[in-house]
């Protein structure tokens, strides 16, 4: 396979950038600032890495205008270097070609509909009344249950399971091991024993969503669990029944969102965040890693609840004092009342 090459001038014209240095410098790949070679492009977005710029061997560096004079070679000036780097790097991301057709080992129910342009890989099963749209790619070992619908351009990379009543919008990408449409965790106690509450809803995924490996999105109890368009879920995320996540939100790995919680648009949840059920988070909220959201958030902004890492000796002292906070608060309140 021939690797494409691009000059700084070509990239500048394609992505609306300014060239600083030799416009004829050519690159055939991308790498980090510290390890890029003369034939590669890199970027500088975080000021913490500015010290690496002077020693970088990269052929081209994408950076902001303020950093252009410090670049040792050719630079492309961008308003958002990271965003621009992502777009340029996509030029070198060559996905394998998936020819249309159905592998002989696939098992497809007679009532299912599969577009002729779709690729159905080895050992795939497709259940009753399910629909696979144009140009979809269903990777090896994936299972599509009953009454599922995949709109055009969806990709189930491998071993993805859509249990039942899952509807995917256009261009949804799901990574290996993910399970959508499993039973929500609905239980009721009766005479000392659990009764399972039937999960009669489904899952609806909007256009251009991406769902990470081994992530689970449970179907709703009565209504659907919903991800609006362009939602991005990392690996090992748990989305419980009847959760709704607003468009363009992104959720990092090991986060768990309990049932019927509502997450707004353009929200960012860090790794290992916990969200209690039946609450609401408004638009444009950032929750930092390992925080627990116990109450609804009504104002945009950044929120944290985790305890910062300290040495163990300090942590033990703080933990011991934490147990004394209630008594201390009562003493302060008592003194305040006496002064009144």
Image: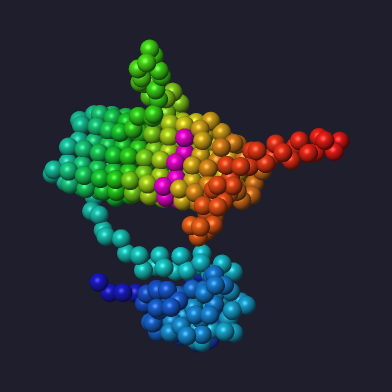
For image coordinates 49% across by 73% down, the residue present is: 43
Residue 313 higher or lower than 203, as above or below: below
Residue at the right extreme of this rendering: 340
Residue 246 higher or lower than 98, as above or below: above
- Looking at the picture, how far across and down is residue 97, in whole percent? 26, 58
Residue 26 higher or lower than 282, as above or below: below
For image coordinates 43% across by 81% down, the residue present is: 58
For image coordinates 32% across by 39% down, the residue present is: 179
Residue 282 higher or lower than 85, as above or below: above
Q: Is residue 255 magenta?
A: yes
Residue at the top extreme of this rendering: 191
Tell which of 34 and 43 is nearer to you.
34
Residue 92 visible (yes or no): yes
Tell which of 100 and 258 is nearer to you.
258
Query: Is 28 left or right of 68, judged from the image as shown?
Result: left
For image coordinates 70% across by 36% down, the residue present is: 330
Give the image's coloring scheme: rainbow
- Looking at the picture, how far across and down is residue 310, in whole percent? 52, 59
- Looking at the picture, how far across and down is residue 238, in whole percent? 41, 40
Q: Quadrant of residue 295?
A: top right
Look at the image and tell me in which quarter the C terminus lies: top right
Tell which of 187 and 231 is nearer to you.
187
- Looking at the picture, how far across and down is residue 112, in whole percent? 25, 32
Tell which of 320 and 75 is nearer to you.
320
Which residues fall within the magenta stretch?
250-258
Query: Number of labelled discs?
Result: 0
Look at the image and tell me in which quarter the N terminus lies: bottom left
């Amino acid at each position: 396979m021939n690797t494409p090459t691009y000059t700084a001038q070509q990239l500048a014209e394609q992505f609306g950038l300014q060239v600083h240095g030799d416009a004829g410098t050519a690159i055939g790949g991308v790498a980090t600032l510290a390890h890029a070679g003369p034939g590669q492009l890199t970027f500088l977005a975080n000021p913490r890495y500015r010290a690496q710029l002077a020693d970088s061997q990269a052929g081209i560096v994408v950076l902001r205008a303020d950093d252009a004079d410090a670049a040792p070679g050719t630079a492309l000036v961008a308003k958002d270097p990271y965003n621009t780097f992502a777009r340029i790097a996509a030029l070198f991301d060559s996905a394998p070609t998936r020819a249309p057709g159905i592998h002989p080992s696939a098992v497809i129910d007679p009532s299912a509909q599969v577009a002729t342009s779709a690729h159905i890989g080895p050992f795939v099963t497709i259940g009753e009344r399910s629909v696979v749209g144009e140009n979809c790619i269903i990777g090896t070992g994936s299972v599509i249950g009953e009454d599922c619908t995949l709109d055009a351009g969806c990709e189930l990379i491998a071993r993805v399971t859509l249990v039942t009543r899952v509807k995917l919008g256009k261009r949804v990408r799901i990574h290996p091991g993910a399970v959508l449409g499993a039973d929500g965790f609905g239980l009721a106690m009766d005479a000392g024993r659990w009764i399972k509450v039937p999960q009669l809803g489904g899952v609806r995924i909007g256009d251009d969503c991406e769902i990470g490996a081994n992530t689970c999105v449970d179907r709703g109890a009565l209504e659907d669990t919903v991800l609006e368009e362009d939602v991005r879920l990392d690996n090992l995320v748990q989305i419980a029944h009847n959760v709704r996540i607003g468009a363009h939100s992104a959720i990092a790995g090991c986060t768990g969102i309990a049932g019927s919680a509502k997450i707004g648009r353009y929200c960012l949840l860090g790794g290992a965040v916990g969200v209690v059920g039946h609450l609401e988070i408004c638009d444009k909220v950032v929750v930092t890693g390992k925080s627990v959201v116990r109450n609804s958030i009504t104002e945009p902004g950044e929120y944290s609840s985790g305890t910062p890492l300290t040495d163990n000796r300090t942590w033990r002292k703080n933990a011991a004092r934490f147990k004394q906070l209630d008594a201390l608060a009562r003493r302060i309140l008592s003194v305040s009342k006496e002064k009144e």
